[in-house]
Image (tube, helix red, strand yellow):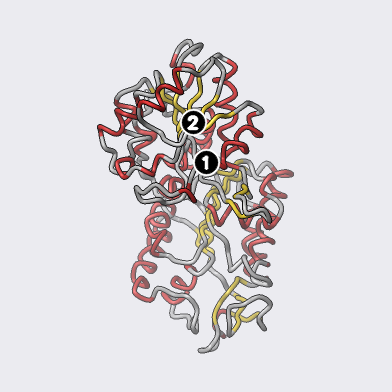
Amino acid sequence: MTIFKNIESLGPLEGKRVLVRADLNVPMAMNDEGERIVTDDTRIQSVTPTIKFLAEKGARVIVLSHFGRPLGIRNIDLSMEPLGQPLANSTRLPVSYINDCIGDEVLEVIDALENGSVLLLENVRFYKEEIKNDTNFATELARNADLFINDAFSCCHRAHASTVGITKILPSAAGFALEKELLILEGVLEKPTHPLAALVGGAKVSSKLDVLSHLVEKVDHLIIGGGMANTFLAAQKVNVGVSLCEHDLIEKASTILAKALSNNCLIYLPTDVIVAKEFKENAQSRTTNTNDVQYDEMILDVGPDTVKTVCKGLEACKTLIWNGPLGAFEISPFDTATVAVALKAGELTQSAGLISVAGGGDTIAALNHAGIANQFSHISTAGGAFLEWMEGRKLPGVQVLLA
């Protein structure tokens, strides 16, 4: 098992200035009063145990995060300020805010903090030097603290100043959420309980080629759904009509299918599908065999026979990794397969001991839509980092925390 530095390795915390890299890039919407409000606080909840622990130990807690993609430009619409109250609500601690993340004024505020207090800094990506992993910028961030804790797994695939550069300057460790994430994910893919299944869906195979190529060497069952399944069907000479299909990747899809066969990995592709002539809510649709898709139809979900086959396969598995929906789950009735398989996975987790791990924004949204996210063994808050982990890549934000 990989050994990495954790909070306990940092020694006494009382009076220490501890900079916590969180991911507070959460979904927000405008309320009737024109205020930005959080619509999903999963990531806020994930960093809460670390912040509370530090505060209880008498540390001065300084929270650093990004929000949106300001591209190095200060943008009031992407300010961290509205996140202060949700963070306070979650931690049940007073949270103050300052409208910058570096500089003498920030230092003055930090120096005046009382032990056990929490300060939220401004959006770190207001500085273009952040994503460049600029050494001088990392040094400026490090001036704010005595110790650094990364508790944002969802940012660990980025070699940024606030995830990598700062660790060269300050004693650093993984927070509780990151530690938990790493332990669970390492166990699931590197030392899993077999049979191991992976369900990979989503719109395009191009974004997950490396994932699929890596998984066929690791898993016993690979379930492919969503728009990407159409490319694999086309590779088997199936007419997919006007469905989303990356025809230029058919050869690569064929290579993955052949690789799966040589690795004794059982591939699940749709045998029946739900098709429609237009992509809209409650569009007229029909269920058909994959060999009977018409030239003017698009595949928007997998069919009931495929769902039965997938669910039967899951009954034989001990571990499941899920990334991506099986169909266009955002609109009815093309959410049927995703919901049905999610319900089955949740049931098996609760009643049969299936170890189920899911990650990615669309995946979490789909499981929440099915109402069973809380039934899974673990839901990762990460998107890109979760995908790169599934590809078998070394994540730079994790590598710098290895003991």
Residue 46 point in image, percent of width and height: 58, 36
Q: In this view of the protein, can residue 176 be seen by the observer?
A: yes
Residue 358 point in image, percent of width and height: 57, 48
Q: Could you tell me if the residues under marks 1 and 2 are in contact, i.e. CB atoms within 8 Å?
A: yes
Residue shown at the point (35%, 65%) measured from the top left: 255
Q: In this view of the protein, can residue 190 be seen by the observer?
A: no
Q: Mark 1: few, some, or many residues within 10 Å (few <14, many ≥20)?
A: many
Tell me the kind of residue under disc 2: Val
**Relative side of 351 to 264, left or right:** right
Residue shown at the point (37%, 73%) measured from the top left: 250
Q: Residue furthest bottom?
A: 295
Tell me the kind of residue under disc 1: Leu
- Badge 2 marks a residue whose secondary structure is strand
Residue tagged 2: 63
Residue tagged 1: 24
Quadrant for residue 134, please give it.
Answer: top left
